[in-house]
Image: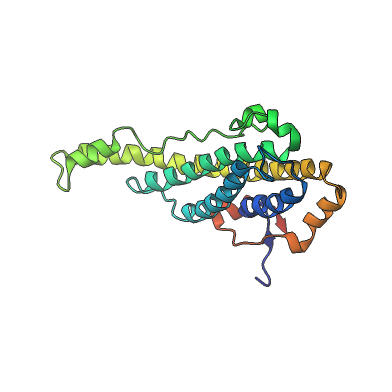
Amino acid sequence: MAGDDVRFGATTWFHDVLVRFGYDLFEHEHPWDGEWIDDAFESAAIDLRSTGAKLLRALEWVDDDPLQGPLTIDLVLAYLRRILDDLAIVIPNCYGVEGRSMPRGDLAALGFPCPVDLDIPTHSPTLYMVVDAAGPKPSLPKATARTLDESGTVTIAAVVALDAALAQLCTWLDDVLATLQREIAKRADDGDDLLARWADPDWSVVCRAIPAIAKHLPVIG
């Protein structure tokens, strides 16, 4: 919008994978098992786009409510894990012919270890067991309230941990995208001209950056 800074980063990454690599691989990629483009790559790239869109929506629902908060955080973490799983399928294909012998499904083995641990506890282990057993009129209201308070502390810490993870992932995903673009350009006939074309404003994908992501993205004024 006029007067606003334009932010690029993770909010555009998933569409970039599909638009840039999906478009150019038809021209530059080698056949995989008799197909001009690897079906697994295509499915993973499309899923990245969908999951990225869902991730942005899920992030808007994150809260620190002791009962509902864990559900909203778990959803975001699940989407992030799915994105990493798809990424582990996309990367080998972007490396070209060598991709045939590269390990698929293992980011660390591919040289792109995830920089964050997404195994974040979102509530105390006994929260839902206690709350469900207590019902609307708990026989031990103080004990139930104590469990809610204790679990709420875990949930608040999870929100903080998720924010820190997003800060790292935004930078990491941009670095991965830049690396994959260079790998495609290395074997493309137009080489550096391809990188220049991708850098053209016509190739830029601008979308709404929600607050949870926007604060971690670089700003281009």
> Residue 219 at what x, y percent from top left?
70, 56
User: Which residue is more in the foreground, 17 or 78?
Assistant: 17
Asked whether residue 204 appears in the rendered view, the answer is yes
Which residue shows up at 82% across the image and 41% down it? 187
> Is 152 rendered above or below residue 20?
above
> Is 116 rendered above or below residue 194?
above
Which residue shows up at 68% across the image and 36% down it? 92
Q: Locate residue 114 relative to residue 149 in the image: left or right.
A: right
Q: Which quadrant of the structure image shows residue 1?
A: bottom right
> Is 140 rendered above or below residue 111?
below
* Residue placed furthest toward the front: 34
> Residue 139 at what x, y percent from top left?
13, 40
Q: How many marks?
A: 0
Asked whether residue 221 appears in the rendered view, the answer is no
User: Which residue is more in the foreground, 81 or 215?
Assistant: 81
* Residue placed furthest toward the bottom: 2
User: Which residue is more in the foreground, 149 or 164?
Assistant: 164
Q: Locate residue 58 relative to residue 20 in the image: left or right.
A: left
> Residue 153 at what x, y percent from top left?
39, 39
Which residue shows up at 41% across the image and 48% down it? 72
> Residue 21 at what x, y percent from top left?
70, 49
Q: Which quadrant of the structure image shows residue 115?
A: top right
- Location of the C terminus (image quadrant): bottom right
Q: Which quadrant of the structure image shows residue 33?
A: top right
Q: Locate residue 4 relative to residue 159 in the image: left or right.
A: right
* Residue placed furthest toward the left: 139
User: Which residue is more in the foreground, 142 or 211?
Assistant: 211
Applied colour scheme: rainbow
